[in-house]
Image: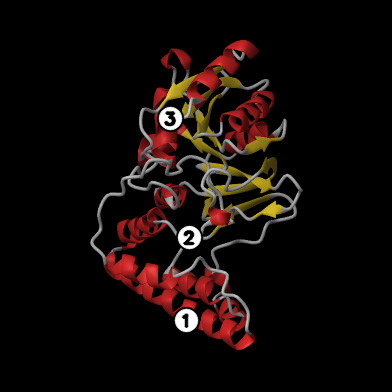
Amino acid sequence: MSARVLTVILNWRTADMTLRATEAALVAMQGIDGAITVVDNDSGDGSEAVLRRAVAQRGWDRVTILQAGRNGGFGAGNNAGIRAGLPGGAAPDYIYILNSDAFPAPDAIRLLLDHLETHPEVGFAGSYIHGLDGDPHTTCFRFPSIWSELEGAARTGPISRALRRHVVPMEIPAAGVMRVGWLAGCSLMMRRSVLDRIGLFDETFFLYFEETDLCLRAARAGWPTDYVRASDVAHIGSETTGMKRWKRTPRYWFDSRRHYFVKNHGRAYFAAATLAHLAGGAIWRLRCALARRPVGDPPHFLRDLLVHSLSPQRPFHPAKGAPSPSRSLP
């Protein structure tokens, strides 16, 4: 029996774009046993009706529309689709999650599937992501650490060279396959048997760090993640969250960062990572002041980071209109 793939696409107020992503996924799913589930993450703007009507009109019998019922964030929305499984209740062998602003090439899904089928020791596999203009998006990473917090905030040559093995973004290979720590969830295929062992996305994360956490749990269980350069996916990027237009870093980013470090490394490690980030940020701001150049971070970022790290941890409840599903790096 051929391997069965469930593709999950999460929608939040981007119905037209989600339909474009679904159409591209349908082409890429040709010849692959499985189905596509589009999850509406409680958009509240009529998206669900638009999606259902379009799917019916276009005769997409491999596509199911599912209402999540709440805006629980990226992980929770994808989990809803994963838990629903294939039509008829069958369990897929692989789960492929695709952003609603991402468009896989016709062979992109097949290449990820073939890689996992021929490398049974690998848990997850992800694609090469690029913008509509062809510019590459860095979506392959090492896991965050105290040293990476210092390096990433300082953005200074001597520090980056000294800490090169801790730099989170990894250089995109020209070809082949590269072992990574984690991949952005823009185009990511996961072995269902691994998810059965380690669990699905941690729904404490509203947005950001959820796939970092998932890949770390897989790696700790002995299931690494691979970056498959030949699997090609075009991506608009930050369409839902508006990350590139942030005037202030939202609380959910700080919440997710803290949860990731505390959950996986403990409170003392989180405190040290925050101090390292503050130190690196101070170095960067001194450089910018001396060079009379803009800092480039959202306003009050270091202050917000410090204040949040000292505040009591509490569950994040998204305000009406808070983004949730499609997110990507700047």
Residue 74: give x, y in percent of width and height: 44, 41
Q: Is residue 36 left or right of residue 149?
A: right
Q: Is residue 188 visible?
A: yes
Which numbered disc flags the more N-terminal residue, 1 or 3? 3
Q: Residue at x 38, y 53 (%)?
A: 252
- Quick check: marks 1 and 3 in contact, CB under 8 Å? no
Q: Residue at x 39, y 41 (%)?
A: 201
Which quadrant holds the N terminus? top right
Question: Which residue carries the number 2 mark?
Answer: 143
Quadrant assignment, res 77: top left
Q: CA distance from mark 1 to mark 3?
A: 42 Å
Mark 1 crowd level (few <14, some 14–19, many ≥20, 10 Å Cα): some
Question: Which residue carries the number 1 mark?
Answer: 282
- Residue type beneath disc 2: Phe
Seen from the viewer's position, the closer of residues 111 and 24 is 24
Q: CA distance from mark 1 to mark 2?
A: 23 Å
Q: Is residue 291 left or right of residue 120?
A: right
Q: How is the image coloured?
A: secondary structure
Q: Secondary structure at mark 3?
A: loop
Residue 283 position (above or below residue 128): below
Residue 205: give x, y in percent of width and height: 37, 48
Seen from the viewer's position, the closer of residues 61 and 125 is 61
Mark 2 crowd level (few <14, some 14–19, many ≥20, 10 Å Cα): some
Q: Secondary structure at mark 2?
A: loop
- Residue type beneath disc 1: Ala
Residue 204: give x, y in percent of width and height: 32, 46
Quadrant assignment, res 308: bottom left
Which numbered disc flags the more N-terminal residue, 1 or 2? 2
Which quadrant holds the C terminus? bottom right
Residue 210: give x, y in percent of width and height: 42, 48
Q: Which mark is residue 44?
A: 3
Mark 1, mark 2: which one is toward the viewer?
1
